[in-house]
Amino acid sequence: MEQFSISFALGKGSAPHGGNIEHNNREFLASNVNEIKSPLNVVFTRTDIEDAYHQLFDDALEKYNEKQNRPCRRIQNYYQHVASGNRESPFYEAIVQFGDSINAPVGSERGKIAKDMLIEFMKGFQERNPNLHVFNATLHLDEASPHLHIDFVPYYTKGRKNGLEKGVSMKAALEEMGFRAQGKMKNQLVLWVQSEKKVMDQILNSHGYTREDKHVKHKHMSVADYKTMVNSQKTMQRIAARLGLSGEEQRSRQELYAKLAASEKKVEQLEAERKSPYACFYYSSPDKQIFVQDVMRQEGIHFRETDNGFEVQECFARRIREIEKTYQAPASTIRDRLRDDIDSFLYQSKSFDEFIQKMKAANYEVKQGKYISVKPPYGQRFTRLKSLGEHYDEFSLKKRMKIKARFEARLDKRIKELEAEKATNLCVLQEVRRYIVVVEKGDLPIRKKDKTQPFSWSNDPEIDKLLALNNMLNQGMTVETIRKKAETLEATAQTKGAELEQAENDLRQYLEMKEKIEIVFEGKASDAFSLEQAKAAVRQYPDINASNYRNIDKVVDPAKVKVQELAEEHRAIRSELKTVTEALSVIEKATNHTYVDHLLADQRRIAASEVLMNGIYSGESL
């Protein structure tokens, strides 16, 4: 009978690796998403999380507040109250999958079967779990394999002595649904995840399939087999004695068996890695992402870059979490923070006097003389602006304000021209203007495309995206031609990626052969190959001898160059594809004049939760 593997991963929305609703709803596109196929995604429900909280808890919140005599104890917004606290996550996300990108890819027959089974699973989810309110659920068919994202709010309904009579709690929600802890290893969450996996098994069986357990490395052994394995060394010694082998020969044979066992284990590990599906990791801190990726490179863990992080096979997820724990965020110096504040005040001001007033309004102490000095509310001493660098003395600040004003004047002039022409790209520049207005009002924080340079409108990633789209439209491109270009670039990237993978495999084989040659002819020590393995490999090439073995470099060096060239080409294509796909994601919002609205909504969510909501954890590990 054919088999499907199953996967049920659970994440906290408030954890560094929890749920990412923007990704689920395709409000931003990672590089692994085929936007052409995004219309095929199945949306089961899509409700704003704050609306879901109002629907669930407004009545209970009103009753709670009526009982509070002290105004400070009343809760104005229950969602913000939960999201900003540390006791409970505001929501959870389950990611469900039958099969993987190897044996059930999107578009294949098995992929279609996986899709049908996921729809069946989703249809019964809310009924099975009455205390898990699903506010967002999407089946993705625009990535490598079909998978389901279910975002839900866990809530209890039984009154409590303190707090709301109905509120958020995963533990209490599961207990109301009948899951009682049976010890540390079988708490409510573990039992619930096991229950959902049983449902997945039943769906598999109803479709005529059985479950493939990828984690089973060895068949079940009987007691006799186990005893034989435990006493294998004594058994080998008895056999060796009967064969009349010497002690040295016995040790040599034992070493050979040990190497064979290690090789088999390595093969199993590599096979598991090859079949393991990819999981996404996102980081709000670029420094943390760089740190994690550097350690992964050192350990030989392969990963794929995405727009907001990277993808790595799930078999490495536990190791990545261990790496994350070793990261220590660099402390932001007062001078760094001061530069950011000055950039923000400068771009919220129309004149230099207004800039000074904004600093004072933010509790800055300002001394104006030959040189301007400021003391921020979080600092202990005054700092001369000129000491912050060439872009922060009074002359440079005024010059930057003039550059800012010129940019905005040119933008306004161009908008008037396009209004007269009724041009198609008018909406894009209007969104640029709206964005500038909300940043100047302080509703959106400034963000820098190049963090080594001071902020400016030309160093703003959002304006950069909008202007990139504007340039495409100016060149005569349309939504359709941009979409076709994305398809062409994606196909080219896949082809170039396959060439790169083949070149990397060839180089790996050449390097392995070089190492074996050096073991034989130079006596090089190696953890990867024994002398016997090296000799066996070299014997297959009788023309290689002690006088010409160094010629292997004539094969290895061009292979290295080829890999580097292909990697550069692939990187350039992926970069261009990223620009084009970003343009596709921007154009619809810009056309509907909702691009800035989405940015404001994202900022409100971040301000409410104070944590980037993303990532994946397995249910058993929570």
Image (spheres, rainbow, N blue to C red):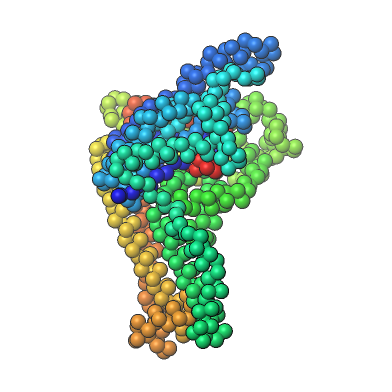
Query: What number of labels is visible?
Result: 0
Q: Residue at x 52, y 85 (%)?
A: 245
Q: Residue at x 45, y 28 (%)?
A: 129
Residue 130 versus residue 550 in the image, above or below: above
Q: Is residue 571 left or right of residue 184?
A: left
Image position, residue 95 (x, y; %): 43, 39
Tell me if residue 243 comes above or below residue 527 in the rendering: below
- Residue drawn at point x = 53 percent, y = 50 percent: 318
Rendered image quadrant of residue 393: top right
Rendered view: 379 above or below 257: above
Q: Residue furthest right?
A: 380
- Residue 357 image offset from top left, x and y in percent: 63, 26
> As drawn, is 418 to the left or to the right of 615?
left
Please report the residue visible at 48 percent of the width from the left and 59 percent of the height from the top.
222
Query: x, y (%) of residue 254?
Result: 52, 76
Instruction: Identify the image quadrant of the C terminus.
Output: top right
- Is residue 235 in sight in this rendering? yes
Observer-nearest residue: 580 or 75?
75
Looking at the image, residue 1 lies above or below residue 189: below
List the single residue furthest toward the front: 224
Residue 165 at what x, y percent from top left? 58, 17
Along the horizontal axis of the image, is 456 left or right of 208?
right
In the drawing, does residue 452 fall left or right of residue 545?
right
Q: Is residue 417 visible?
A: no
Decide which of 381, 492 is in the foreground and name it.
492
Looking at this view, is 442 or 313 the one in front? Answer: 313
